[in-house]
Amino acid sequence: MIFRNSKGQVTGQLLDDKVYEQRLNRRKHSFHSRGELAVDSQHLKSLTHLGCVKVRKIFEDTGETFEAGMEAFKEHGYERQWTESDGVQTFLNEKYWHYENENQMKMF
């Protein structure tokens, strides 16, 4: 199932294994100064109802992958209006995400 933002742009997809996957550019889609990643709150609610088990963010420009279970959002996430066009987002500190870096793995 494909998810879109208010502008009609694809933001991610719920895969057959019940993982919501987003492919992004790190420079545009993270909040480095606060060490947080966010997911559209309405999408998160829909994903919960659809049985999603985790969110995966793949940053294609850096080779980084972050994964967080839905429970982490319930226990540690908080909602905030980021911009008028983005709507309400649920933020989750990066310490609650499992992290891998494809580029670091290639070094060994």
Image (spheres, rainbow, N blue to C red):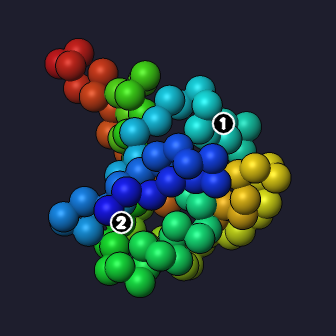
Depth check, front residue: 95 or 48: 48
Binning the other alpha carbons within 10 Å of mark 1 as few (below 14), some (14 to 19) or many (20 upward) gives: few
Binning the other alpha carbons within 10 Å of mark 2 as few (below 14), some (14 to 19) or many (20 upward) gives: many
Q: Is residue 82 left or right of residue 96?
A: right
Going from N to C along the chain, the mark reached first, 1 or 2, is 1
Residue at far front of view: 8
Q: Position of residue 31 (x, y in %)?
A: 67, 41
The tag on residue 16 is: none
Q: Is residue 23 left or right of residue 34?
A: left
Task: Say above or below: 21 vs 102.
Answer: below
> Looking at numbered disc 1 in the image, what kind of residue is underneath it?
His
Residue at 56%, 48% in the rendered image = 8
Q: Tell us which disc is closer to us: 1 or 2.
A: 2
Q: Position of residue 47 (x, y in %)?
A: 42, 73
List the residue tagged with mark 1.
32
Report the quarter where the N terminus lies.
Answer: bottom left
Task: Say above or below: 45 vs 101.
Answer: below
Task: Say above or below: 21 vs 63.
Answer: below
Q: Position of residue 22 (x, y in %)?
A: 41, 47
List the residue tagged with mark 2.
54
Secondary structure of the residue carrying tag 1 is loop
Residue at 59%, 27% in the rendered image = 27
Residue at 61%, 31% in the rendered image = 28
Q: Is residue 35 left or right of residue 108?
A: right
Can residue 92 be seen from the camera position used here? no
Image quadrant of residue 71? bottom left
Can residue 101 be seen from the camera position used here? yes
Report the quarter where the C terminus lies.
Answer: top left
Residue at far bottom of view: 49
